[in-house]
Image (tube, rainbow, N blue to C red):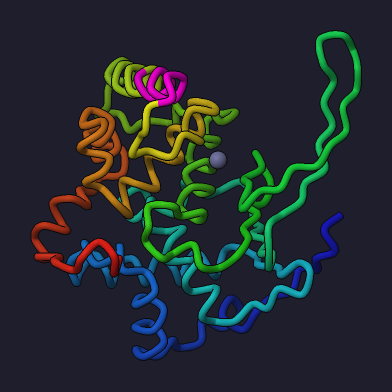
Amino acid sequence: MFGFLGKLLGLRKARKPITASLWRKVESGLPFLDFLDPQDRSRLRELARDFLATKEFDGAQGQPLSDEILLGIALQACLPILNIGLDAYRGWIGVILYPGDIIIPRHEVDEDGVVHEYTDEVMGEAWEGGPVLLSGFDGGAGHGANVVIHEFAHKLDMANGAADGFPRLPAHMSRQAWASAFGAAYDELCAAVDAGLPTTIDPYATEHPAEFFAVSSELFFTRPRILIDAFPAVYDQLRSFYGMDPALGEARQGRTRPESER
Ligand SMILES: [Zn+2]
């Protein structure tokens, strides 16, 4: 359907050594990783290697698959599961990369039984039990809009059924507290968007609770202060869920670069 072949890359097959300079080059394009301390940074690298060894990557429409691109995606895909584990991404194997926006044919039947055929242009999409589709490989610029983290958050959400903004929570977390924090924040953002008020959170998050979870996850890792300021209870829930505190890490690292450079 997408004209891709299960092309295995050298990175996957042989776990060939990745030079320190390549790691540095890729990570320099992902400045939001700076909140990690050196130990976590090296655990993330290991997890990224394991991820590359267990998933298949395909380039659609002539999208090249360089080591640099694959490492960049693997680091971002593994950031959310650094303290959850690679098992969270079991049950599917493929990541398909596109050079530009992805055009997806849709087919819907409305309440009157009328079939609607149309196409959707998206930057990424995660299919339940299927591949993750990603486009344009500049998603790691750290501006709070990160298509890789977004789509892999959907994958975590889908680990316990259809994407609904309610992933499988670890035993120590309360489902009630999650529902209450996310429900209140979602309603508040929807009300603000409906009222035409400016929001610091992308209004796309109001499309569905699953999108709210994915957009919040992007912010949690790439612009944590924005999420804390807007919805502190959601930040707290994500901190427990992901087992990380990016805002604290940022403060500890003394990140002082101006916003414009992030
Ligand atoms: Zn989404």
Instruction: Please tell me whether residue 198 is drawn above or below residue 131 in the rendered image.
Output: above
Residue 245 included in the magenta stretch of the image: no
In this view, the residue in front, 242 or 230, is: 230
In this view, the residue in front, 43 or 188, is: 188
Instruction: Please tell me whether residue 250 is drawn above or below residue 172 in the rendered image.
Output: below
| Residue at position x 37%, y 57% in the image | 143
Instruction: Residue lying at the far right in this picture: please name it.
Output: 114
Instruction: Residue lying at the far front in this picture: please name it.
Output: 196
> What segment carries the magenta color?
188-196
Q: Where is residue 241 in the image (x, y as percent from the top left)?
A: 31, 38
Q: Can residue 164 be seen here?
A: no
Instruction: Please tell me whether residue 160 is drawn above or below residue 111 in the rendered image.
Output: below
Q: Position of residue 109 (x, y in %)?
A: 85, 20
| Residue at position x 38%, y 27% in the image | 197
Q: Where is residue 234 in the image (x, y as percent from the top left)?
A: 28, 31
Q: Can residue 5 be seen here?
A: yes
In this view, the residue in front, 151 or 12, is: 151
Residue 189 included in the magenta stretch of the image: yes
Q: Quadrant of ligand 1?
A: top right
Is the C terminus in the top left, top right, bottom left or bottom right quadrant?
bottom left
Instruction: Please tell me whether residue 67 is drawn above or below residue 52 in the rendered image.
Output: below
Number of on-image labels: 0
In this view, the residue in front, 101 or 216, is: 101
Quick check: 150 left or right of 249?
Answer: right
Is the N terminus in the top left, top right, bottom left or bottom right quadrant?
bottom right
Q: Where is residue 178 in the image (x, y as percent from the top left)?
A: 32, 23
| Residue at position x 37%, y 33% in the image | 198
Q: Main secondary structure of the magenta part?
A: helix
Quick check: 220 left or right of 110?
Answer: left
